[in-house]
Image (spheres, helix red, strand yellow):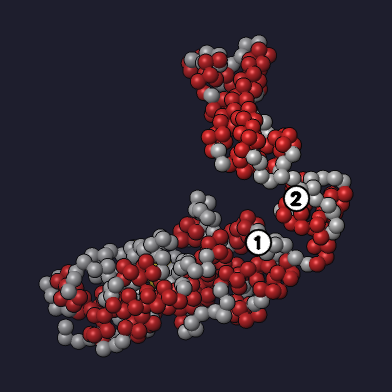
Amino acid sequence: MKSIPALFPDETIFSVVQRLVTMECASSYRHAAKSLFQKSSMQFSSTFPSVVPVLSIRFDCSPEYWINHHSVLPHYRPFTPEGRFRNALSHLKKGESEKVFKDLSLIANRQCSGLQMRFCPQCAIEDNDAYGFSYWHVKHQLSGAFVCLRHKTPLVNQSISRKRFDNWPCYDAAGRRLATEVELKLVRFAHYFQHHESKGFRHDLCDIFKASLHEKGFLTKCAYVRLKALRNSMIESLEPVLCHADVQAIFDDTRSPLYPTCVLSNKRSAISPLKHLLMMTFLFDSVSDLINHDISYSQKVIWANTRSSGQERDDIAGIRKALNRGDSLRNVAAETGHSVAYIKKVAISTGYSIESRAQKLFATERRQVIWKLLAGSSTETIARQFDCSQGAIEQILSQNPDVVTLRKLRRKYTKMKSMRQSLTETIRSITTPRRQDMKCENNTAYMWLYKNDRQWLYTHLPTAIPRNLRRRKPLSD
């Protein structure tokens, strides 16, 4: 290699590698790559290519310089546990890119593809005017960077080849539309975490998010997240970015658990930066707003405000009123939405006498309970007969899984008998029964038997009408 090319501002490592290979004197790009990096089959277009050690020696720059100025790894620092980020940083310095993907959980988050890169057409034109060609920018490859923050226009996705070294932005065929405010806010958060050198927040992002959710009314009185309402509100608010494939994958209804559960619960996991950025875009007006919430966060304030003393007094009054009527603890718990243990605690603290029943039964009584369970008696009825709690009967039932299976079969048989009788009466009530008429007349029984007793259903259904004799629209229509 005759000379070392100059490094351009915000240039990706892949772009530098392409220029090195192009300038190397060799019979082909493949031989040039092998001469430079000892291998020609490396994933040069990867998000974290394994060429940092070689580039550090050739350009006489430290690995930290390449990582901080020419890679997207700093973007992951606030969203990754400190220990795992240190491991990723160490592995990237050594050129072990496979381990970096594992450290950042990119494999689990399905973000290992390096077959597409993004660029801004206006930036490409300006680069071509200034340097004679256009190159790939780091800021355009960040998670959530769907628009150019400088020109406020959407970025263009371009497919690249792993085996070629002439993958440059093709800005001739580029659309022109202005970015939406949601897209701009999302990319502002992305740029801040790429260029900000802070080691992290004072508090966990999960807790900061919950503090803001509390202000917006998405927490229950017990400080639980109203997930369904939050998800629907996020989909409505983030609609301008839902057209992007990465965001669509995050809001996919087939994912388990549904987003944003992972962002609000997994404090020690490496979650995709885009998932965090979407939550920030929804909750906060700006980066300053996010930082202010981090500074003013207080768990005591959340708990104090989610359940006020006035609400608690109202709940206790409702519980006392139900106990005065003579309702059981279970019924009061179902009516007020509290646990049986809480109802019992309130009853004892307010002076109500609780009739404690036996929680344990002798072996003879346990055998009798099992026989009654086999006979199909309800746990509530058995508990009254043996003068014990319903929980004691349910505990015996859970210890005998074969009895549980037989009770399910018994209930299914009873249900099947009822559905058969219902459909039989429907058939008798129709003068000339047809299958469609029976389905319309008694759809509940018809569909239940279709799913659970199809053989009996088809045996007792009228003969199917041949297709050529079925109803057709008149030719005049």
Residue 282 sits in quarter: bottom right
Residue that appears at 61% across and 14% down: 433
Work out whether residue 436 or residue 307 is closer to the camera in this orientation and state it: 307
Q: Amino acid at mark 1?
A: Tyr
SS for dot 2:
helix
Q: Is residue 262 visible?
A: yes
Quick check: 335 left or right of 450? right
Work out whether residue 249 or residue 388 is closer to the camera in this orientation and state it: 388
Q: Amino acid at mark 2?
A: Ala
Q: Local crowd at mark 1 within 10 Å, few (<14), some, or many (≥20)?
A: few
Q: Which residue is mark 1?
A: 224
SS for dot 1:
loop
Q: Which residue is mark 2?
A: 333
Work out whether residue 351 or residue 23 is closer to the camera in this orientation and state it: 351
Residue that appears at 67% across and 31% down: 377
Residue that appears at 11% across and 72% down: 27
Q: Is residue 420 above or below residue 98?
A: above
Work out whether residue 294 or residue 10 is closer to the camera in this orientation and state it: 294
Residue that appears at 63% across and 68% down: 210
Residue 314 position in % (x across, y down): 84, 59
Residue 398 position in % (x across, y down): 58, 42
C-alpha distance separating marks 2 and 1: 19 Å
Residue 4 position in % (x across, y down): 23, 86
Quadrant occupied by the C terminus: top right
